[in-house]
Every structure is written in C-alpha cells, then in structure tokens.
Amino acid sequence: MNLIQEIDTPAIIVDLNIVKENINTYQKYCDGIGIKLRPHIKTHKIPALAKLQIRAGAVGVTAQKISEAEAIISEGGIDDILITYNIIGKKKLTALRNLSKKVKVSVVADSSFCIKGLSKTFEKAKEALPVLVECDTGANRCGVTNPQEACELAELINISPGLIFKGLMTYPPISQAQKINSFLSEAKKLIEEKNIAVNTVSIGGSPDMWKVQDIPIATEYRIGTYIFNDRSLVEKEICLDDKVALTVLATVVSTPTKNRAIIDAGSKVLTSDLFGMNDYGSVINFPELRITQLTEEHGTIVSEQNTNLKIGQKIRIIPNHACVVTNMLDEVNLIIEEKKLKKEKVIARGKVW
Amino acid sequence: MNLIQEIDTPAIIVDLNIVKENINTYQKYCDGIGIKLRPHIKTHKIPALAKLQIRAGAVGVTAQKISEAEAIISEGGIDDILITYNIIGKKKLTALRNLSKKVKVSVVADSSFCIKGLSKTFEKAKEALPVLVECDTGANRCGVTNPQEACELAELINISPGLIFKGLMTYPPISQAQKINSFLSEAKKLIEEKNIAVNTVSIGGSPDMWKVQDIPIATEYRIGTYIFNDRSLVEKEICLDDKVALTVLATVVSTPTKNRAIIDAGSKVLTSDLFGMNDYGSVINFPELRITQLTEEHGTIVSEQNTNLKIGQKIRIIPNHACVVTNMLDEVNLIIEEKKLKKEKVIARGKVW
C-alpha cells in the first residue's frame, strides 16, 4: 500500500497478482467446460498482458480494430488474432493484408459488401483469409438478423477467392441463451447442408462469463473485462471486490464542505460510462462515499455524513468500466509485488482506426 | 468536401476557417464589453490553436492541469498561463516551480493547505507566484463557499512568502448572475477593506458566453468550447450549426436492418458524455437519424424510417461535447482551405496529471 501511495495522481493501478489469478481462474473454467478462450485485448491494450493470457492457455486474442491489432502484436509473442469488426475501405484492407503476413489473422463480416472487399484484397494471397459471419442474436448492433442470411453469406465466403469460411460469431448478451442457441444451431445446420464446415462458433462477453455452458454450440469464448473486472461486474455479482485488478488512484484536492470533497480524477480518467448505474465508480474502503459528478478533471465525492476526507489524501476507485479507463492514459502502474512497481505503456491506447 | 471524404475514419475534422471566425467573433465581443479573454486550452490541447487565440487578442491561456500547461507551452509562443486547479503534492509543486521559470504562471487555491504548499515551493523564488482564490458561486465543485472565507484566504496569500494575491476566480454556471455578483462583490469589498488589491476577477464558461455583461465585477473571461462549439451549445442555441468547427468523420460499417446502421465511431471517439441530452451526437445533413447507442468502437444509428445509409458511406457528426473528443485521439485533421489539409497533433492529449 505504501508503494501505491507514492504514485502521483491521477493514475491507473493494475495489480499483477490479481490479473494472473483472474486469467488463470477463467482459463481453468473454459478448459473445464471444453471451450477455447480468445481474450479481447481492447480491455488492457497492453502486449505484456496479452502474452500472459496466451501463456495461460488462450488460443489467440481478439481485437476490435486494425490499428489495435497492429499495436498488440508489435512486440511479438502473439501469432493468432481475430478482428471482430467489418473491415471496410482500401486503407484498412491493405493494412489487414499486411497484418496477415505477420500473424494468423481472421475477421468477421455481416454483408456481401464487406466480403467482396476482403476477397478482392486476398484473392492473390498465399493463404486464404478465414472469415466468420457475424450474427445478431439480440444485441441489436452488427450482424445478420436471421440464420438464412448467415447461410447465404457463408456460401458467398465459400466461393470468394482468397477467403475461407471459418464459422459463426455473435456478440452478447448471451443471457438470452435460448435465442442464441436456436439462431446459431439453425444457421449451422443450414450451412452444413451446403456442405460447408462450421469449424468455429465464437461467442463472448464478461457479464455472462459464468454461463458459457448454457450455449453448448459455442466452441470459442471472447472476453475482455475479466482480466481486470470493474464496478459493473461487481454490481452484477460476477466477481468480488477483491478480484478487481484495475483501480484509479486519485488525490483529494479540495474539501469545500464537510460532506463534499473533490478529487483530481474526472471524466478524462474515469470516463462518463454509467452502464445503467448511479455514480462514477466506488471508493475502496469508503462505502459511504459516492462519486456523484464528474467534470473533465474533477470528481465530486459526497457523503450524507462527513466525508472525513483530507486534502492531499489518496483514495482508490473501482471504475464503472475498466475497458474505457485504460484507453484514457498512456501508461498504467503495474504492481508486481508488494515492493515492486513497473510502468507499462498502454501501447494500443487510442487505436480506434 | 471531397478532401474530407478521403480521410480515413474514425477521425476528428477541424475546420480552420470556422475556428478563426469563432475566435475573432468572441474576442470582439469581449473587447466590446471591456473584459479580458483567457481561453481554456483543455478544449483543443493544440499549441497552434492556442497561439491563434493569443494573436487574436487573448491576454493568455487557461489550463486545468500542470502537465497540460507544460504541453501547451512546449512549442513556445505562449507566455502567460493560468492553471485553474489546486496544485497539491511535491511533484506537481516542483513542476509548477519549473514552469514558472519558463512562462508567467498563476494558479488558484481554495484552502490554506493548498496555499501553504505553494508558499513553501515559491518562498525562495525570484518572483512571487500570483494566486487567485477560487470561489464556489453555485457550481458545487471546488471553491470557498462564502465571501468571508475568500477574504481569509486572500489575507493568508498576502502574508505568505513567495506568493502574491491576484484576485478571485469562479467556475460557471454564470446563469446565476445575481448570486455571482453578490458573492464576488462582497468578497472583493472584504478583501479591499484589508488593504489588499483585487486585480483580477476571473469567471468563465461557454454556456453563458453571451451574458458576460451581466457580471460587471468580472475582469477576465475563461472559455473553452467556443473555439469549436458542439451539440450541447447548438441545442442551447448558443451557436448555429454552421459555427461548429469540430466534427467526427465516421464510416457506415453495417446496415443490418433498414432502420439501423452501425458506424465505426463509438465511445472511444465520441465519449459517453450526454450533458443531459438524448443521443450521442447529431449527424450533419441527416436530421432524421439518431445516434442512440455507443459501445466502445460501434455507434448505433437508428431512424423511424429507412436510414438510407450505405455501407462504406462517410458521415459527419457533431459530438455532444467537443472538449472530451479531442482528448480521445492523437491527432486532428485541420482543414486549412478547400484543398488543403494538415494533420495536427493533440499535444496535450491525456495530460491529466
């Protein structure tokens, strides 16, 4: 704790022991139910942590964007990456082709437009690009909206030069297990009837991370937040407080009234993500304190009673959403052991391209 | 427009002509009512834009954090900076002292704790550090909560080695003009009765930028968003759509249904800031489209009718809050004239220290 108190604020603190525990616990869970784990690096954006996930048994990693994938493989040690995004436009397609020369890369697609762009880019490639069809099983984001459409795109991929159909992919919520099972089973059946193999069925999401066995058709699980955990997962009782590896260290800079204190972490650190909750994080060891408002560089802490906070005092906050907090700063403070700290660059920070 | 269409997405576009017009219009307004303008660089974090503000007539700039101030002066050309933040802790105080050797720097304080730290740091300095007392006139953030306390801190600054009392500072909302006038007038009177000069009364904020004359006691105005404007100011009718200089360019990556399209800008570009509004930005030229949901790298656009968007199509979005969007990416695309574009680094991005 003394080591942490010496870090200047605002700062992101990552406890490496908890990180390792989270990685191992979940890898064991996946191994136990016989599903492959493909962690999403959007949460940490740090190559060293991705490599810990691989070493623990992950089959590869997931990235959301091309530039994020480029950054995460930059140090070596990662050779299998799935980009769960429709890659559109010449520059990004060229970047994808270049990436595929360095590591084993696969992508998703949910339209013939996207598939045609991929095929044109890879038609002369030595190895075909594996493509999964993204299915919308309830998230109302990307993805084909019915099994028939999934089958049509699988057929298109199958006949497209430079591409190989790899399987189906969906994004949470998997809480609607029945819908997901029936959508994906139906799509798989239709595709197999066309004599096309469905090798991978990739699902994911932290909120339902302990219910993966409810989707027996799945072969692969993508998950990001589990490495750090956050307030959203604590509130949903997905994890306990002591399994939260990422916290924000902040300093009290003002105590204008007895029941209000101001800290030096605002929305430019904690972000405005609420995830349907009240408040912008929870203060460790001070359950009675509430972070009720953020402006860019100030966080407002209130208490019904005296906050008992003093100017200069440092506090630790569990942020609402870990995946967006790492993206705000250039580095995190990795606590390696009680007396050892290492600053680690968030190499894929801001890589939204 | 063709030039913009060639920029890869997601990207921040800044129209330099509108920037200059916004700077000049507001400088003229301040000159007209006889108030000094001290723009807040937290909005753009780009030295070149700060220098445009200075050249137009600003007396100096405002920064929120030490590291932000260090970054904004790094290219030279800025020699007067007010940091509107309580500087707490040895490392930051040392950085402040170093900064004061390079440029004219002033700060605020709202506690004796903060003042003592400043005094200890500057007691042997060649020139005294100017300090303003921050007053809470209704924002419920930092600041002393009554005029008597402001006077006590002014007296403390006045007798503290290395410091010189400069005046009073408050943060919006100035919509409560009467409260602000009476608080600041009373504080000024009390301080002057102690034979201490109140040279500066610094107020600010974009939402009330055209009502500055309602606070006659103010001598200086701090404002950030006006250089770009954003959806929050358009909605409040502070500016018109055609005075918005900063937009986000995004590409449609999926059209899963007729009335839903997905773009490649999510909360890691547009941020989750809502400012009490519905939706996450407005789509230029498509008033019928709504950005109803953001995940990290996806924006969901819906329409009651057909969205009429096509995959690969680029759209421009006015973000809810410009000041947080520039902080998400490493560079902006500055449109200098119809056929000329310059990438400009957001040098103070992520400088929350």
Image (cartoon, coloured by chain):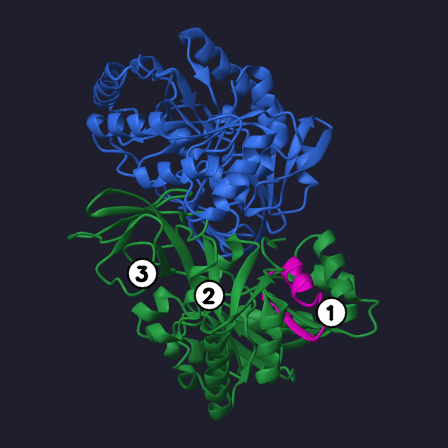
Chain colours: A blue, B green
Q: Quarter of the image for the N terminus of chain B: give it.
A: bottom left
Q: Amino acid at mark 2?
A: Leu
- Residue A18, by quadrant, is top right
Tell me if residue A350 can be seen: yes
For label 1, the crowd category at 10 Å Cα-Cα, with few meaning under 14, some 14 to 19 and many 20 or more, is some
Instruction: Identify the mark nearer the N-term, 1 or 2.
Output: 2
Secondary structure at numbered mark 2: helix
Which range is magenta?
A: B64-84
Spot occupied by residue A93 in the image (x, y as percentages of width and height): 48, 42
Gap in Å between the C-alphas at discs 1 and 2?
Answer: 57 Å
Gap in Å between the C-alphas at discs 2 and 3?
Answer: 21 Å
Spot occupied by residue A299 in the image (x, y as percentages of width and height): 49, 52
Name the foreground residue: B144 vs A39.
A39
> Residues at badges 1 and 2 in contact (C-beta under 8 Å)?
no
Tell me the tag on residue B282.
3
- Residue B53, by quadrant, is bottom right
Name the foreground residue: A195 vs B77.
A195
> Residues at badges 2 and 3 in contact (C-beta under 8 Å)?
no
**Which residue is painted at 29% across and 58% down in the image?**
B277
- Chain identifier of the residue bearing label 1 in the image: B
Secondary structure at numbered mark 3: strand
- Chain identifier of the residue bearing label 2 in the image: B
Q: Is residue B65 magenta-colored?
A: yes
Tell me the tag on residue B160.
1
From the viewer's perspective, tell me whether residue A264 is left or right of residue A230.
right
